[in-house]
């Protein structure tokens, strides 16, 4: 039984997760407090506000998570915490709290890479074996990774400019939709005509499965500027066009990564996994489901509440690491940058 703590961005999370006899993860509690309302007025996450909000709510959330799980601190086997990558102030809040809890309870501390937690969630929900292909798509990350084992990743592709979630958020902002934009763009897209605008599909058919989103964003801006003032139909059609372009790009880039998978992992993937906040998008899920079927693979997409940031994924990654004896000492530092693939070139934007 592991307590997991998440404070890397704008969600404070605390959760208790255990494992049944067959190795399947069981979430005993999963407390998440979103700070979206505190950041909305600024159109994005303000690091100082985020760090303060984590300080204010974390102890309460931990108490609640233990309570809902029906256990006390002394009952847990380890304290797992996301030690990065993320906004340094928030990460330090979670890490300091986790260190204090581990010290007081005399339990091991496990410093989890937030991206690894997203990656391993599919093993908690669907017990898939290594290696698998992971498409990690969130507000700050867009990566295709061969997941070969715990702590063993090969990055096949990444974005050379914006992350996909960021492109959704910026598109929403240009079209006057609220923050965070992803869910709003998806809702508008459902009513729009995806064929009205001729939008680019950047990087399509490139040999390396990298992404580039800034050209698409610019194309949306140019179309929107031509139409000002935008009608509701204009907004829906632009959203539909944007999302259709994203789905085409995601499917093409993931197909390319599948082709290169065996060379990176030594064998075929057991599954195609999508994770991160953007994985909530049904259009993207549909596209990936088609691709997985075409490749004879299963698509594993965690339930929406496990796609967004949460403590359960940190606790599960902690369980996986604990079972391999991978624990950390109390001097472990917070890491604003922490690539999963240590050998990969840093992405030009640092966003990976
Ligand atoms: P994360 O960085 O993992 O916390 O995920 C947050 C990002 O996911 C933000 O950029 C959101 O706009 C994006 N997002 C959330 N839901 C959706 C959705 N349904 N479609 C597209 N993007 C989404
Ligand atoms: Mg995340």
Image (tube, rainbow, N blue to C red):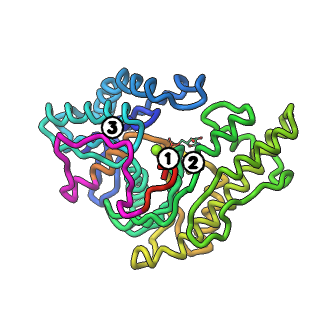
Res. 209 mark: none
Res. 307 mark: 1
In this view, the mark in front (1 or 2): 2
Residue 302 seen in render: no
Q: Is residue 273 left or right of residue 225?
A: left
Range of magenta residues: 320-344
Q: Nearer the viewer, residue 269 or 21?
A: 269
Q: Callout 3: 10 Å neighbours few (<14), some, many (20+)?
A: many
Res. 278 mark: 2
Hey, which quadrant is residue 224 in on the image? top right
Q: Is mark 2 within 8 Å of ligand 1?
A: yes
Residue 245 in the image: state x and y as whole percent. Answer: 72, 56
Residue 108 in the image: state x and y as whole percent. Answer: 17, 44
Res. 5 mark: 3
Q: Is residue 191 left or right of residue 246?
A: right
* Quadrant placement of the N terminus: top left
Q: Is residue 306 left or right of residue 320?
A: right
Taking the spot 71% from the left edge, 51% from the top edge, the residue there is 216
* Main SS of residues in magenta: loop
Is disc 1 placed on a helix, strand or loop?
helix
Q: Nearer the viewer, residue 293 or 245?
A: 245
- 239 above or below 251? above
- 56 above or below 348? above
Residue 125 in the image: state x and y as whole percent. Answer: 42, 54
Q: Callout 1: 10 Å neighbours few (<14), some, many (20+)?
A: many
Q: CA distance from mark 2 to mark 3?
A: 21 Å
Mark 1 and mark 2 lie on one chain; the one further toward the N terminus is: 2
Mark 1 and mark 3 lie on one chain; the one further toward the N terminus is: 3
Q: Is mark 1 within 8 Å of ligand 1?
A: yes
Is disc 3 placed on a helix, strand or loop?
strand
Mark 2 and mark 3 lie on one chain; the one further toward the N terminus is: 3
Q: CA distance from mark 1 to mark 2?
A: 8 Å
């Amino acid at each position: 039984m592991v307590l997991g703590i998440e404070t890397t961005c704008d969600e404070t999370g605390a959760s208790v997760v255990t494992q049944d006899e067959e190795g399947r993860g069981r979430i005993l509690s999963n407390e998440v407090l979103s700070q979206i309302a505190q950041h909305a007025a600024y159109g994005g996450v303000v690091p100082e506000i985020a760090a303060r909000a984590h300080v204010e709510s974390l102890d309460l959330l931990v108490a609640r998570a233990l309570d809902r799980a029906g256990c006390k601190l002394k009952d847990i086997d380890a304290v797992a915490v996301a030690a990065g990558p993320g906004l340094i102030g928030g990460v330090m809040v979670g890490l300091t709290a986790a260190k204090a809890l581990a010290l007081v309870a005399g339990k091991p501390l496990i410093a989890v890479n937030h991206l690894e937690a997203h990656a391993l969630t599919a093993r908690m929900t669907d017990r898939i074996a290594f290696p698998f292909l992971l498409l990690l798509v969130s507000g700050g990350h867009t990566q295709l990774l061969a997941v070969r084992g715990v702590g063993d990743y090969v990055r096949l592709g990444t974005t050379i400019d914006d992350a996909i979630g960021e492109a959704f958020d910026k598109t929403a902002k240009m079209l006057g939709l609220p923050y965070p934009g992803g869910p709003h763009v998806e809702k508008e897209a459902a009513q729009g005509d995806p064929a009205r605008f001729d939008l680019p599909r950047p990087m399509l058919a490139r040999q390396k499965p990298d992404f580039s989103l800034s050209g698409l964003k610019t194309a949306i801006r140019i179309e929107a500027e031509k139409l000002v003032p935008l009608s509701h139909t204009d907004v829906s059609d632009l959203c539909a066009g944007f999302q259709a372009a994203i789905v085409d790009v995601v499917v093409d880039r993931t197909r390319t990564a599948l082709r290169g998978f065996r060379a990176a992992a030594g064998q075929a993937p057991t599954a195609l996994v999508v994770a991160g906040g953007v994985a909530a998008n049904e259009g993207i899920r549909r596209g990936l489901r088609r691709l997985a079927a075409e490749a004879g693979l299963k698509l594993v997409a965690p339930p929406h509440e496990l796609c967004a940031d949460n403590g359960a994924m940190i606790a599960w990654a902690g369980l996986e690491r604990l079972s391999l004896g991978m624990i950390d000492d109390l001097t472990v530092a917070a890491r604003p940058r922490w690539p999963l693939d240590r050998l990969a070139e840093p992405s030009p934007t640092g966003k990976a």
